Image (tube, rainbow, N blue to C red):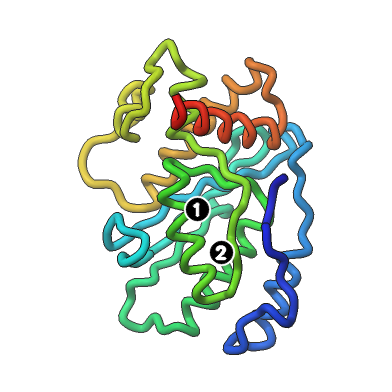
Amino acid sequence: MFGLKKLLSRSTLPEHLPEDLQQALLAWQGLPEAMDAVHFHTRYVVVDITTSGFKVETDKLLGITAVGVVQGGCMQAADAFSVDFAGADVDDAAVDRQLVAFLQFVGKSPLVTYHTPFVGAFLQRLMKERLGLDFQPAYVDLAWLLPSMFEEKDHNLRPLDHWLELFGMEAEGRRDAMTNTLLLARLFQRLLVRANGKDIDTAGGLVEESRACSFLRRTH
């Protein structure tokens, strides 16, 4: 089963949220999921985050960047999102609005990440704290899928830069958040082609394959 485990209602929304944000959250919840659609008809959203450290319990989520991937691999400059939570003028009310804007950008698209447990945990924690939302979207984890789909290149779990080098993508020096997200999207483009070649031709199939790869590698 995909999607949220806990549905939102008026009674579960935080009281501090203004009316327009409550309405936006309820509208977002009602959006349909399309896990049976083929890749060409699915909008995936590639997501990366910046944090103050690696401990979900104590460190902070500093920013989110995302880009849409449509029609089996196309990216458009207008279909991108970036938010910085670290600015001096960002208060709790601003964070709430930025998180809702992120949800509206994502819709119910599957999210593509590198190391879902890390990215997902930071997103879920802030969504829960600020919006009362148990945020558990459908994820495609490149960290697990790349070695499964491209065993001839490397069948082990590796850092992101290792895969960028294998595919001949620029990976030298310090990258900003959006550049990193676009590189992830380019890797995902390669993955979609390989997935179709393996008859994994729907969004739901790709999400399930990601989960299966993660489970098998973690338990064996």
Q: Split into 4 quadrants, where in the image is the N terminus? A: top right
- Relative horizontal placement of residue 112, taking residue 119 as reference (left or right): right
Residue depicted at x 65% and y 32% = 72
Local packing at callout 2 (Cα closer than 10 Å; few below 14, some 14-19, many 20+) is: some
Q: Quadrant of the C terminus?
A: top left
Please report the residue visible at 39 percent of the width from the left and 14 percent of the height from the top: 153
Question: x, y (%) of residue 205?
Answer: 68, 31
Q: Amino acid at mark 1?
A: Ala
Image vertical order of residue 42 relative to residue 157, above or below: below
The residue shown at (60%, 68%) is: 133
Neighbourhood count class around disc 1 (C-alpha, 10 Å): few under 14, some 14–19, many 20 upward: many
Task: Count every numbered label the image shows and give the total.
Answer: 2
Whether residues under marks 2 and 1 lie with C-beta atoms below 8 angstroms apart, the answer is yes
Question: In the rendered image, which residue does mark 1 sit on?
Answer: 66
Q: Is residue 182 left or right of residue 205?
A: left
Query: Under tag 1, what secondary structure?
Result: strand
Q: Earlier in the sequence, mark 2 or mark 1?
A: 1
Who's the residue at 68% across and 83% down the image? 20
- Mark 2 sits on what residue? 102
Q: Nearer the viewer, residue 145 or 102?
A: 145
Expressed as whole percent of the image width and height from the top left, the position of residue 91 reads 41, 84
> Residue 22: which quarter of the image?
bottom right
